[in-house]
Image (cartoon, rainbow, N blue to C red):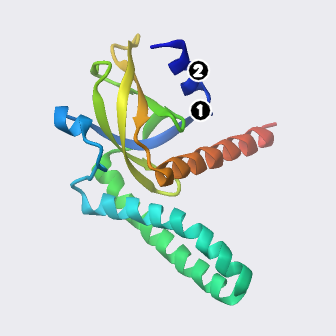
Amino acid sequence: MTTQDEDDRREYYRIDDTIALEFTQLSGAEATASDELHDGSPLFNLLSELHVLDYESQHLLRHISERDRTLASYLKVLNKRTDLLGQALAQSLLREVGSPRPVTMSEGGLSFDHPQAIAVGSHLALKMVLMPQALGLLLRAVVIHCQALDDGGYNIGTAFEALSDAQRQLLARHILQKQALQRRQARQQP
């Protein structure tokens, strides 16, 4: 890895988080394909699409709010109902994806512990459910490091590949919210 790559990765703020995470290694054709990943789970795809649509509609809601407060209030209530449905979906998905585990995350990538080594340069499909907003994301990543741990496991470091603007913004929003929560909790400590 070059110094430039390390500098690029360091430009993003990192957080320690707990997320539901499942991954699969992508084969040669899947790894080089530029099209969007799709998961076999209709519930996961629905949850992911709900969050992308929510992100894409935020600027429209701001414009409506400037012109018609009553309509904007009504649309916010509908959006809240959709969020509640999404949270119910996420609870079902947590059973499918697995119980949450600790990770270190940034807009540039994700690192996590795993019992087996994964070769550097391997391409992965990361299926993540970010809590508490139950944000479902399916992202491409490449393994950039695989370091042995004292307990016999490995710390796997990945860099996201080909993020859409919506995916990057959803990750950034999650990271900022988590960072704000950590700061509030730190201030409340005696």
Task: Look at 73% across and 79% down and name the residue there.
Answer: 66
Query: Could you say which disc has been placed on residue 14 in the image?
Result: 1
Would residue 125 appear left or right of 160 to someone viewing this image? left
Who is closer to the viewer here, 40 or 150? 40
Residue flagged by tag 2: what amino acid is it?
Asp
Percent of width and height locating residue 185: 72, 43
Query: Could you say which disc has been placed on residue 7 in the image?
Result: 2
| CB-based contact (under 8 Å), mark 1 and mark 2 | no
Q: Secondary structure at mark 1?
A: loop
Which image quadrant for residue 91?
bottom left
Who is closer to the viewer here, 63 or 134? 63
Q: Is residue 74 above or below residue 100?
A: below
Task: Look at 69% across and 79% down and name the residue there.
Answer: 65
Disc 1/disc 2 C-alpha distance (Å)? 14 Å
Percent of width and height locating residue 111: 45, 28
Percent of width and height locating residue 107: 53, 38
Q: Quadrant of the N terminus?
A: top left
Q: Is residue 10 above or below residue 149?
A: below
Which image quadrant for residue 186?
top right
Instruction: Report whether residue 25 is seen.
Output: no
